Amino acid sequence: FQIQRLKDKLGTRKLPTAELLLRGVPALPVAGLEHGVRAIAPMLNVTRTWNAVSAVSLMRRGLALAGDYAARRHAFGARLAEKPLHRDTLAGLQAEQEGAFHLTFRVVELLGLEEVGEASEDELALLRLLTPVAKLTTGRQAVTVASEVLEAFGGAGYVEDTGLPVLLRDSQVLPIWEGTTNVLSLDLLRALGETGGPAPLARELERCLVDPGPGLVEPAAAARRSFDGALAWLAATADDRAALEAGARRFALALGRSLELALVVRHAAWAARHGDPAPAAAARRLAARLPASLDVFDPTDADLLLGG
Ligand SMILES: Cc1cc2nc3c(=O)[nH]c(=O)nc-3n(C[C@H](O)[C@H](O)[C@H](O)COP(=O)(O)OP(=O)(O)OC[C@H]3O[C@@H](n4cnc5c(N)ncnc54)[C@H](O)[C@@H]3O)c2cc1C
């Protein structure tokens, strides 16, 4: 075989990517010569879950660095950590990270149950549905958070020798490899066909919101409103393939964000009972960002904007 070239990539440079030409190289079929997609699907579950774990860890690392910097950097007469607007900005990012964490590790839990043969039928269906949702939602969050982390360092965040730009460069691959946001949104539609609809997701939502406790009633209601709004769109659009595809990304992100919030509400209710009020603050932030219904655009809008 020949190495054509090493790719000159935006990020993930410690993990080289090459173009290899395999000509006349013997190959052994590892799973027969048919049903390739079916054979590779279990691997995709693992790599897409790994992608979400990477997204969460990248966000955590960036926020740890930004928090440390805020505690040391003096600007306009005080430490950044004492400036109300800087605190508010970092708090919003922390809430994003917590939402991503809970959704991701719910998928990790389901994947573990599947691997040891202990997942129920409902859990297997939930795993199938949540894997693309978690991958695409956290991939987009990681890019947003990484960009904000750089900004939280001011000009230093833009300078290579701080080591910070690598965070943004590395984050950008997360919504691309293992399936882009759009491709995974379409995969979610496929998964809904395979699992017979969104019932496993609805049961997961109810599991999380069954007993939010005082102080979490509003965030719980926001999660349910947004989730129901997304499902109402799905029901209304089911027979129009073009409209379904056009809205698939908004639908998938609405499900991802409402399930993140529901999982944070569940954790926050537990944490509140154990004397920790912090996760409830993350729930309130996430709730404030959730749309109650899905934006729907006339398909001719895209033609007008893109010119034909
Ligand atoms: C650093 C790096 C390492 C990689 N390593 C591997 C590897 O080890 N093994 C491997 O197999 N692959 C690898 N890939 C490939 C990667 O998985 C693909 O690049 C990725 O899935 C996107 O596919 P594509 O490049 O063909 O883009 P395309 O499929 O051409 O997509 C281009 C754009 O069109 C959109 N799009 C595509 N189809 C649709 C549709 N039907 N509806 C709406 N929008 C659509 C996409 O969302 C995207 O925005 C790697 C990629 C990178 C960047």
Image (tube, rainbow, N blue to C red):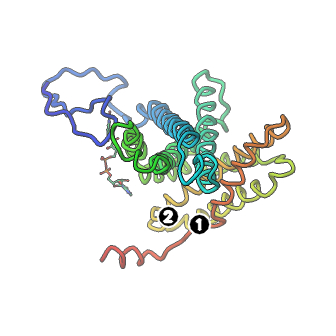
**Between residues 291 and 27, which one lies in front from this camera angle?**
291
Image quadrant of residue 39? top left
Q: Which residue is mark 2?
A: 247
- Ligand 1 closer than 8 Å to the CB at disc 2? no
**Residue type marked 2:** Gly
Q: Helix, strand, or loop for circle 2?
A: helix
**Would you say residue 175 is visible in this rendering?**
yes
Say few, some or many: other residues with alpha carbon within 10 Å of mark 1 (under 14 / 14 to 19 / 20 or more): many
- Say left or right for 273 vs 123: right
**Residue type marked 1:** Leu
Residue 103's x, y, as percent?
61, 41
Image quadrant of residue 230? bottom right
**Between residues 133 and 203, which one lies in front from this camera angle?**
133
Residue visible at 51% across and 53% down in the picture: 189
Residue 70's x, y, as percent?
56, 43
Q: Are marks 1 and 2 in contact (CB under 8 Å)?
A: yes
Residue 85's x, y, as percent?
61, 57
Q: Is residue 175 above or below residue 40?
A: below
Residue visible at 65% across and 64% down in the picture: 229
Q: Helix, strand, or loop for circle 1?
A: loop
